[in-house]
Amino acid sequence: MTFDELGHVLVRARDEPSPLYEPEDPRAFEDLGAFTRNVPLDDYRLDLPPELADALRSWSLTHPPGGFVSRPDLREYVTRGLDAVQRLAEHLGPSWTVRYFDEGRRSAKWLCWGCDRPHGEPNPNGTPSHPLDITVEGEYGCGPLRSDGFGDFMADDPAAALPLSGSLVAALRTWAVSIDTTLNLDVRDRVDGKYDAEWQRLFREGMDLAERTAHELGPTRTVTYKGLANGGLDALTSVTWQGDRKL
């Protein structure tokens, strides 16, 4: 997806109910001065949850018309706005670029949909900075997750910046280690069928972990379970979720 195909929004308090603006010409998305068209909070393209729309509206309308006199009040206001904009970027996902005008610094930063860090420039060529389509697959010597451009990786890899719970990260790591251990034992003992029950258990566990991963990542990404690469033909599958929806 290129920048020409993305939606672009600037979040800036200008004493209007909606602090969201888009450029009249989408190709001018890098020019702050181009963001002159106000975007209503109920715009169907945004599909904002009511609580997020209320937070953005409240933040915008509490901006003092003459600006801030107190620096502590300004810092608190900027921090509250940043929190709302981070939630907006996460909600809109990779199909939008989101910028936040920091009144304290008098500058704008891009907010990443996949992490909590603001950035000084958009991602080059419109390519996602975090994996969008994730595969859960058990394979000897590999991390439990993989995605184009990332290869295989662990669930807590900082480059992927996946917002997964600590318990799920630990469970995926344990699952990957168990696959390595089981294959080592299977190769060592060389007894047909000895570890079939364990391979079947790992297969079922992987399915559950993939579904949990999809649930925690939400509808902005897809998660596909491919089974166990080392468990024989019966351990191969392909099941995909988008959030809680099975595709």
Image (spheres, helix red, strand yellow):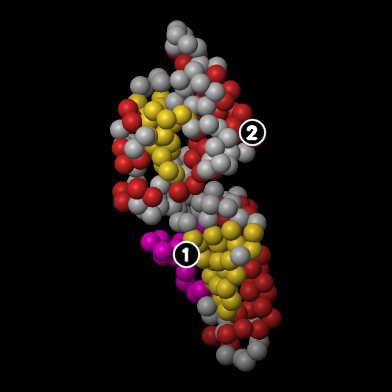
Discs 1, 2 touching: Cβ within 8 Å: no
Residue matched to label 2: 51
- Which residue is rendered at x = 36% and y = 22% of the image? 105
| 137 relative position to 12: left or right | right
Q: Quadrant of the N terminus?
A: bottom left
| Residue 76 seen in this snapshot | no
- Which residue is rendered at x = 49% and y = 61% of the image? 133
Q: Quadrant of the C terminus?
A: bottom right
The x and y percentages for residue 42 are: 58, 35
- Which residue is rendered at x = 51% and y = 65% of the image? 135
* Cα distance in 3D space between marks 1 and 2: 34 Å
Residue matched to label 1: 146
| Residue 204 vertical placement versus 79 (above, below) | below
> Which of these two is toward me, 145 or 31?
31
Q: Is 141 part of what is drawn in magenta? A: yes
Which contiguous range is marked in magenta? 139-155
| Residue 31 vertical placement versus 106 (above, below) | below
